[in-house]
Image: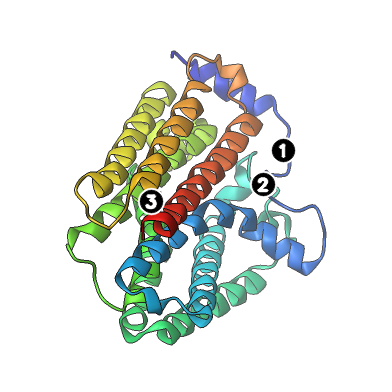
Amino acid sequence: MGVDTDRMAHTTERIPPRREGQTFAGDSLLSRYASFVKLPHTLFALPFAGVGVVLASAVRPGGIAPGTIFWILLAFTAARFAAMGFNRIVDREQDALNPRTRLRELPTGRLRVGQASAAVAVAAAIFIVAAWQLNPLCGWLSPLALGWILFYSYTKRFTAWAHLVLGWSLGIAPVGAYLAVTGEWSEPWWALVVLACGVMLWVAGFDIIYSVQDEAFDREHGFHSIPAKVGVTRALGIARGLHLLAVVAFFSIWFFDAFPVGWFYWGGVMVMAVLLHFAHASLRGRPAVELDVARIDRAFFLTNVRVSTSFFVLTLLDRWFFG
């Protein structure tokens, strides 16, 4: 799977800057804010929160009211907006130097730092209010969750394993959704931990793939990432390993009966494994010139949407038929 990183760096330098995928071309304030936080990426993160709700329904069937779903959706969306927006603010100077990111809203002035900061503050407040509307446990835990997802933005400055910190930021989404419905920790206690670890490993693996685009830039400017530390070829191998462990984590939930799940859930894990296999196979053995920004960005987004959505749908069907 040898990838010529020097050729990749030179090829990247020749590519003129272009608008990132999953952003909007409109110039309205709403479009700018949606692009600012890459709103379409909610499509691959939200289904795992839905998995948490479905698993919780087996413990407390009466806990899923329309109001509960509303506050979960609001809390999740607000937390993601706050985390993504804060990351953009912290990284704005580096984004201005990076050919891949220099067209983002803050480097181009399409949004001012004051506008971005105000939006992040409002989103953070909405998240905490929504958490308290769910139950006291979620309310008390909300500042800790918020602190963790904001902390991620600084980890790239001192550890190559920032990918796992980001993964855990999304890993707490199904845990929070589960707690929102039940108001209590899982039994056995390790069930929610394994669920969160599965999501963490899945996200971290794809974040490593995504960061391949910035391997040369990160190394030159002192940012820490797995590709910058070990090179593209080994980084892709590490990403495969993390995704294998993610599949094992989700499979162990079924195998050890951590939650009351059946064969549809097992099928969801198998679909996930197949989709991840083909995602990695599409990168294996390709010359550096084909590992361009557009290819990686599409693979990152589309595969994540397919994995998370299919897993949620099959978990929901499992609950419907075997509940």
| Relative to 104, 137 lies left or right | left
For the N terminus, the image quarter is top left
Q: Secondary structure at mark 1?
A: loop
Viewer-nearest of discs 3 and 2? 3
Residue at 40% across, 68% down: 177
Tell me if mark 2 has few (under 14), some (14-19) or many (20+) residues whose alpha carbon lies within 10 angstroms of its own. many
Task: Name the front one of labels 1 and 3.
Answer: 3
Residue 54 in picture, x, y percent from top left? 41, 63
Distance (Cα) linking label 1 and label 3: 28 Å
Circle 3: residue type: Gly
Q: In this figure, which residue is indicated by the disc labeled 3?
A: 167
The amino acid type of the residue labelled 1 equals: Pro
Q: Position of residue 312 (x, y in %)?
A: 47, 52
Q: Which residue is mark 2?
A: 102
Bin the neighbour count of mark 3 within 10 Å (Cα to Cα): few under 14, some 14-19, many 20 and up: many
Could you tell me which residue is drawn at 52 percent across and 43 percent down?
Answer: 304
| CB contact under 8 Å: marks 2 and 1 | yes
Nearer the N terminus, badge 1 or badge 3?
A: 1
**Distance (Cα) linking label 3 and label 2:** 25 Å
Residue 96 lies, in percent from the top left, at 63, 49
Residue 154: tell me if it is visible.
no
Q: Position of residue 249 (x, y in %)?
A: 27, 44
Nearest to N terminus: mark 3 or mark 2 = 2
Q: Dividing the image into 4 quarters, which one contains the C terminus? A: bottom left
Give the residue at mark 1. 17
